Image (tube, grey):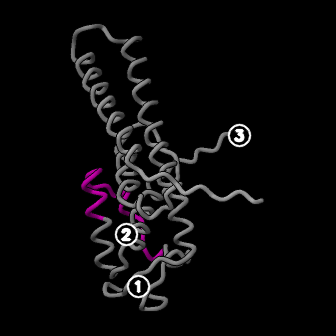
Amino acid sequence: MFADKTLTPRETVRLCALGLIADAPDSYATIARQVRDFVTRITGPSLDLLGSSMELLQVEGLISSSAGDRIDDTARLEITEAGHVELRRLLTANLRASSDLSKLVMALKFRFLHLLPPEDQRAQAELLLDSRETELNRLLDMRQAHGDGDGPFNDWLEHEITQAERSQAWLEAFCERLPEPTPTPTPA
């Protein structure tokens, strides 16, 4: 059976929180504000996305608090080893077709890409490029099947195709700028 390995809204917020904590440990109040600000700037206000609790991250052993078992506004949060494993799993997940959640996941991947080893950075950039290519091909197929030449739908479709082409070109250039991963030595 096919397993969907794309992120759920809850996992997307977990990715944001774990990435922020891994990048710069800070107080609960600061991290919570940063998560809310980042998510709402990409998707707009959403109770579905912001309903997750950082206390759950601590219960699951993904973060630790300077206040021990409790988390208050001033408690400094740090990511645990298990949190780093979960962060990597979330950062390397697949993308769904274009949506507000996909935009948020993409923004989070770029925001925290530097936290991955070079080979994973390159793999994620290539995954994003593949995703964009798939989206562009879907739009081109839609134009061939349903483009009528005139009207609002065709205007919208041409706009989407232009954006997808520009995005693909940008991602190709981004991939070229990434450092090549260091090859692992082969055993003698």
Residue 184 percent location from the top left of the image: 63, 58
Give the residue number, with chain letter if any, for mark 3: 1
Give the residue type that dot 2 points to: Leu
Q: Which residues are magenta?
A: 36-56
User: Are discs 3 and 1 less than 8 Å apart at CB?
Assistant: no
- Of 159 and 111, which appears nearest the observer? 111
| Nearer-N-terminus badge (3/2) | 3
- Disc 1 crowd, CA 10 A, few/some/many (<14, 14-19, 20+): some
| Nearer-N-terminus badge (3/1) | 3
On the image, which quarter does residue 47 sit in? bottom left
Give the residue number, with chain letter if any, for mark 1: 71
On the image, which quarter does residue 49 sit in? bottom left
Q: On the rendered image, what quadrant is the C terminus found in?
A: bottom right
| Residue 31 position (above or below residue 111) | below
Give the distance between the C-alpha atoms of the residues marked 3 and 2, in whole angstroms: 34 Å
Give the residue number, with chain letter if any, for mark 2: 20
- Disc 2 crowd, CA 10 A, few/some/many (<14, 14-19, 20+): many
In the structure shown, which secondary structural element does the residue marked by tag 3 occupy?
loop
